[in-house]
Amino acid sequence: MIRSAESPHPIYNQDCWHFSRVRFICRSLKVIVMESTSSSNTHASGISPEFTQHLIASQSALYAFIASLMGGVSEANDVLQETNLKLCNKASEYDPAQPFLRWAYVFARFEVMAWRKKQARSRIVLDDELVAMIASDWDATAGDASQQITALEGCLSKLPQQQRELLDARYGRGEAVQDIAARQCRTENAMSALFYRVRKTLADCIELALRQEAYE
Amino acid sequence: MSDKSRFVTLCHRVLEGQANEAELAEFRSALRDDPECRQAYRQQIKIHAYLTWQHGRAAVDESLVISTKPDPPATPPRWNVAQLGLALSLLILVAGLTGWWLSSPSGIPLVVISASDPAFTKGDRVYRQQIDLADGSLKFRLDSGAEVEAVGPVQLVLVSDMLLRVTQGSVTVDVGDDAIGFQVETADAQIIDLGTRFGVSVRDSGETDVVVFEGAVDVHSAPDKSKPSNTIANLKEGEAIRVGKNRASQRLTSVVVRGDRDEVLAGSKDPIPVITDITDNGKHKWKNRCYSVRVAGLGPPTKSYAGIRGPKWRPLGGKRLPEAMRGADVVLMYSRDRFYPELEYYVNLSVPSRLFVWHDVRLDPPDWLTQDFQKTTIKLRSGPWPPDNDIVSQIEVSEGEEIYVEYEVWQRDVPAGMVTLGGNHNSMRKPRFAMYGIAAKALEDEPAISEP
């Protein structure tokens, strides 16, 4: 679909806010998340502004959780999208008194299991027992995802320039570790160990930052 | 797990999606038996995922709630307090998600991925109607998911998140699955993406060059009220054309690119290529075949052949590419050329250069190579190759070991101008050997080649 130059950006389009017979879609999910013929409010569909806020704020945490159960990020985005769909469909069942992420993790885990069933055995990194163990460990540490991302930003700025450039090459430009290693005349093993250390530094830094924040 | 360095290696292989069956089994065992390994894995994958997310390499569209085409209301909508509150909340939420982005509704929104101009900061969400770069480069992502790399001097107009209009210079567009149908317009051509990565250059003369690095595009004549738009070409990977004012097109024999992601450099003065053009005498099935010349591209592993994903030019295992070859311009070759001994290549060099040709060690070198070039002691390799490729069918390796083809490097010092190179072998059909590679480096201050 091509939008003309004159069309306003979708978020400024007043049609968005016309609830009578308006269908709202999660565009990238390519699914209808709400189709309301009610002209009163969103409660008929079960999606409240608070729910939407939780869903948006939880995306990075859900992505990380899904990647951890899948053993990598390569298809985590697809499973996240399926999870979002499920969460939208189940919005009316969400109890606002409960932590949103903990509730969402249940559906995310279910979607990971559904993804695993479709995969060849050789593509599955973790077995059922390990998925349960990792999910259990993860669930116990469900914190505020947006705080973690904010803390990550701060921790990245504290890294030495050389390490920031490495992360930029790997994650920003999507270069293979093997290629980065070759460019810097290092072995791939040495480079992977360096990335491991940098990620550990960032994890420790985030934990420290959140702990300090909790005491302040 | 007692061997921590082993766990680090395994964790890396898993995160990068490179672990084989045996490594996966070892990794699972470590996680199952050792809570510290589980803790370390959880930490590593979380940061790995956050960094992937934070750099925009995985993201759910931030415009979470938008409308499809609604039926027009019979009467103007009446807003009650709840609706207004909800609308406001949603707007704030969407804006809040992009809190670190600049917000100005004027122009088309884009997210800066990288920029040489300090006016743009990586990660910024800005709104622009046009981009005018005198030099340097800018890479950004549009809301449609299309990623655009512009190399100065370049002028382009952002018509929408699915349409760019290039008035001067070069852009390279990487179109994600969500942006299939993305269009680039110039004065003479309309390029419609069919799921791909492609480059468009508008030359000073006004002609439009279109090159496809992955996938395919349709090239049409530019929309014109007086004439209907007609299809000029359907281009596939490794093909390129030049479209003129009269809608006529011709094969574009080569393009100069930078980096491993093929940023088109036409029109840019920096860097200046040593190999300015390469063409051949072949009549190809793909009549618009185009060679990519990667400026200063020899050094880091670089893709060897168009259309074959795996193999890259590399030094031999554990060795470093000799300084004399590092930074040479390197040509992306066509593997199928190995079938045609009568093929000739015409390489144009901008300055006196050392021309390198590396040739499969398993194959007798052709006469033109032994007569005109000097054999060095250097060897290169390409790989890893998919095991089912006929080129490596006779190379025996242990199970799980990656397959590489070795090449002997030949060299020749030549003046600026055109050099003719011949086919991969003398006369017999020898398809089960790899096509040779070509690179050139300016001769100034060049150290003599010695043992690697």
Image: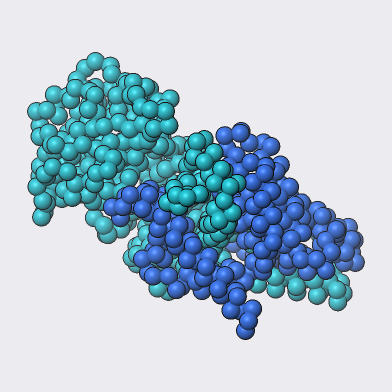
Chain colours: A blue, B cyan
| Left or right: residue B262 compared with residue B63 | left
Residue furthest out toward the top: B428
Residue furthest out toward the bottom: A216
Residue A135 shows in this picture: yes
Residue at 39% x, 64% y is: A163
Quadrant of res B417: top left
Q: Is residue B52 above or below residue B286?
A: below
| Left or right: residue A21 compared with residue A152 | right
How far across and down, in percent of the image, does residue B242 sit?
37, 44
Residue at 40% x, 37% y is: B310
Q: Is residue B190 above or below residue B77?
A: above
How far across and down, in percent of the image, does residue A94 sit?
83, 61
| Left or right: residue B42 compared with residue A101 | left
Residue at 44% x, 62% y is: A198
| Left or right: residue B434 compared with residue B156 | left
Q: Is residue A178 above or below residue A59?
A: above
Residue at 17% x, 43% y is: B452
How many numbered circles are shown? 0
As rendered, which of B187 and B255 lies closer to the eye?
Answer: B255
